[in-house]
Image (cartoon, rainbow, N blue to C red):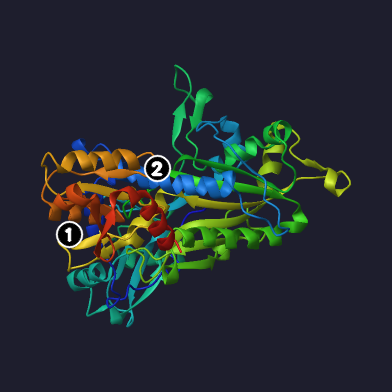
Amino acid sequence: MSQPKQAESPNMPDENNETVDMKDIVALCKRRGFVFPASDIYGGINGFWDYGPLGVELKNNLRDLWWKQMVTTPPIGPDGEPLQIVGLDSSIIQNPKAWEASGHVGGFSDPMVDCKETKKRYRADHLIVLIPNDGDGAWLALHEDAEATEIDKRIKKIGKGSKENYKIETLVSLDTKDYEKIIAPDTKEKGTLTEPKEFNLMFDTHVGATASEDNKAYLRPETAQGIFLNFKNVVDSSRVRMPFGIAQIGKAFRNEVTPRNFIFRSREFEQMEMEWFCHPDEVKKWHDFWFEERMKFWESIGLAGSNLIKRDHDKDELSHYAKEGLGTADIEYRFPFTAPGFGELEGVAHRCDFDLKAHAEASGQKLDYLDPARDNERYVPHVIEPAAGLTRGVLALICEAYTPDPNRPSGVYLNFHPSVAPKKAAILPLTAKEEHVPLATKLYMELREDFPVDLDIKQNIGKRYARQDEIGTPFCFTIDNDTIEDQTVTVRHRNTMKQERIVMDNVAEYMRKEMALMEK
């Protein structure tokens, strides 16, 4: 999976663009148990995050939906037959020779600049520079995703006039001799930025009791290589025939220079990747097929409309494995911190035959395929790779669901698609009276085998509704005095706050019917 690039970067944020404040989303995620800073009681550690009780449920829901769509019930192919895709769970640490062959040891790096005054480090390709139109005065460097208010403050503090007086360039497009004119993002002095240097992104470790270059190893920066290393094992041990796919979900680690934007760019994250092996002559067909399938997947779980777009990679973005083929097409989402631009959600790349050939040469093993369907033609398959960030997908789902609403006590609700909502329903006894709680517990026990439901007894009913709104629960079923009399409950709909009475014995069927309608 390639490094992300904003679709409209460099681009001055539109101050009239009405977006949700990311700070509010981050605050809700911590308050309601979606995402916590890792090692929070010690002040955290930059670039690492923990997923709380609701966050892990949301992440698992997305993971399971992806696995079902890819492996358990893979799509129907162009010929009308189900595709062949099998799963894999490879080791996080592989033989270091694998990372040398794949190009990661020598070429997996980002351009980095240091500030000589503040000692801070920045990714050069993530900085923009505001250059005065009249050519006079200091050039102002900012992060590419800087918000309009941040830019205005910067200009007011050490710039001139307003942002209309500036043009924007990327730092990497400038000649290094111009660096003496630039004021770095966190200082007031010109000329403090160093020339860009390449910074390897892999975390290294050591295997065994002693630490030396002889037993140096790496935490994987992507899950894909474990699939390529097991290509021959899968072909020899299973009944797959070309074309086929191998899918994997797992942790990856990148020592990002400047992890930013909550869980969007972190140093430990999870990927959902599938490598689709096919004959070189069929690459275009499968690239188009998988792009459409992946767009349909994200749309089916709630990321539809103008917030989801396709963008082809520019030539200067292409990874080493994609330069000779069709390149990479990104599925991008408009996050609050990229608006009005977009950030990468999933890439669909043509990796050519680079990886299998590289590992075959380095290992001395044959990694080609004898195709009985093509008169025993022997060839090295080409690869189409749909690769998505699981944790980045979680962030997109939360951002899409976050809906401010001043007409309700919580002021906001999470409009999750029912397939990904951490809790599908909450069972709420109106009071903690002896008559209400047993009936609520009975309904909870009946539903929990089929749905993830929440039995919420404490606090007044208004505060409990507010909590369920903030965690995105589609339905609340309230047990009250009428329930004792006629065995009916009040159902409250999350999005509309509409309430109606239904028979308690019909709650499960009611949920199935209503969720099916919401999923259309």
Q: In the rendered view, does 440 fall on the left or right side of 341?
A: left
Residue closer to the observer: 122 or 288: 288
Expressed as whole percent of the image width and height from the top left, the position of residue 44 reads 24, 40
Q: Which mark is residue 64?
A: none
Expressed as whole percent of the image width and height from the top left, the position of residue 254 reads 43, 43
The residue that mark 1 highlights is 410
Residue displayed at 52% across by 67% down: 310
Q: Amino acid at mark 2?
A: Asp
The residue that mark 2 highlights is 450
Q: Amino acid at mark 1?
A: Ser
Helix, strand or loop under label 1: loop
Residue closer to the observer: 490 or 56: 490
Residue 282 vertical placement versus 455 (above, below): below
Circle 1 packing at 10 Å, graded few (<14), some (14-19), many (20+), is some
Residue displayed at 58% across by 63% down: 292
Expressed as whole percent of the image width and height from the top left, the position of residue 94 reads 55, 31
Measured in 3D between alpha carbons, the distance from the residue under mark 2 to the one under mark 1, in whole angstroms, is 28 Å
Residue displayed at 20% across by 48% down: 428
Res. 22 image quadrant: bottom left
